[in-house]
Image (cartoon, helix red, strand yellow):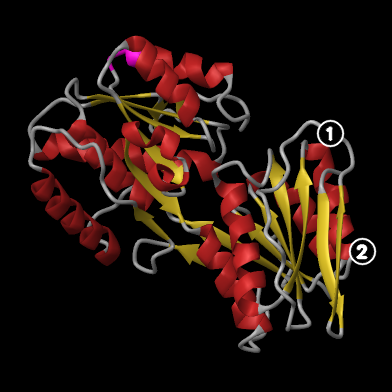
Amino acid sequence: MKNITSRAWTGLALASAAAVILTGCAAAPTETAAPEPTVDYLACAVSDEGSWNDKSFNQSVYEGLQKSEAELGVQIADAESATPDDFAPNLQAMIDQGCDITIAVGFNLVDAVNAAAEANPDMNFVTIDGWSNGATNLKPVNYAMNQSSYLAGYLAAAQSTTKVVGTYGGMQIPAVTDFMTGFYYGAMAWGTDNSADVTVVGWDPATETGDFIGDFTPNSGTSKTIAAGQIEAGADVLFPVGGDQFGAASEAITEAGIDGRMIGVDKDIANTSPEYAEWILTSAEKRMTLAVFDIIKAIAIDGGAFTGDVYLGTLENGGTALSAITNYSGATAQADVEAKLAELQAGIIDGSINPLG
């Protein structure tokens, strides 16, 4: 197990405990003093590989946990996973603490959290980017990331001077390729609208082949190599879908000497990682912080019953969206591009546009 942290209370007395077992992975984001809990409810989370401060999906969920503690007064506990071997024991650690709800972050935990839910029918679980095998005490939280990524692809093609744009993923799993497929068809739509040839390197939805790092290690050498290869193929806008790959991609852009751009994922990267802001065109946000907070609030504060119904984040409900556009220098005026993106978004919401082709 890796980095198990809890904050529990009895009456008005607060006790804090943190345990670190093994070493080698970054700890959770720096915490300020925890507020006095006022609600007898323990909300817990187990990370995917990496760390809570991955500037991506792990961190988004962790911030939802922190927001719930600060604004709702619930207690929280978490366990950080260094490798897949940590998933089951970390979930068990949350079960042993008596968590009222345990959130498993990422597609990779789906088997472990389904097993935990089936073995503990009186406890409630949430799977981010996963699914339930039928357990009514397991709530899937998923996102139609193809929707915001379609808009991102359209914008990327509008920005590109070469009309070659690139995307690559951490691993070839549905939670990743959903971004890449939407991006592909959005870029192709710009080409159709403007009678221009657009090429997307790194992913072909028809053959389901493309460029993948193989894991979600931040800013790996493999990530930089893939980015450099896509730039060599002509890409001047990159869409890395693998957590924090923006250091690797920006290095590849800089070393190639091109006026390149990147599109962020999961969070508003221009704001959360200002060191990359000069390259960021926009981000396809997966608003997990909001979903985690809303689920906890609905039960702990509003008194709602836990259900295993799927939560799907969409453009319509604000679960996903594009961040503000920055560093745009395409031939079409930005105001015109933004107006077109608004039109496309409306079409996706009303069903007249299919972002999956």
Tell which residue pokes out farthest to the front in this image: 33
**Residue 19 place in picture, x, y as percent:** 88, 50
The secondary structure type at the circle numbered 1 is loop
Residue 96 - label:
2
The span picked out in magenta is 230-234
* Tag 1 residue: 23
The mark closer to the camera, 1 or 2, is 1
- On residue 218, the disc is none
Residue 10: image quadrant is bottom right
The three-letter code of the residue at mark 2 reads Asp
* Three-letter code for the amino acid on which mark 1 is drawn: Thr
Looking at the image, is 119 positioned above or below residue 56?
below
Q: Is residue 255 visible?
A: yes
Q: Is residue 2 above or below residue 351?
A: above
Q: Tags 1 and 2 in contact by the CB under 8 Å rule?
A: no
User: Residue 259, how many percent across, how many down?
Assistant: 25, 21
Residue 349: x %, y % from top left? 29, 64
State the residue in front, 163 or 275: 275
Residue at position x 80%, y 46% in the image: 87
Q: In terms of depth relative to the viewer, which is nearer, 21 or 120?
A: 21
In this rendering, position of residue 54 left or right of residue 198: right
Front residue of this view, candidates 44 and 20: 20
Q: Which of disc 2 and disc 1 is earlier in sequence?
A: 1
Furthest-right residue in view?
96
- Considering the whole magenta stretch, tell me its main secondary structure: helix
Q: Residue at x 76, y 78 (%)?
A: 41
In the rendered image, residue 118 lying in the magenta stretch gets the answer no
Q: Answer with the quarter of the image where residue 166 lies.
A: top left
Kindly give the residue lying farthest to the bottom in the view shown. 303
Q: Is residue 173 left or right of residue 194?
A: right
- Identify the secondary structure beneath mark 2: helix
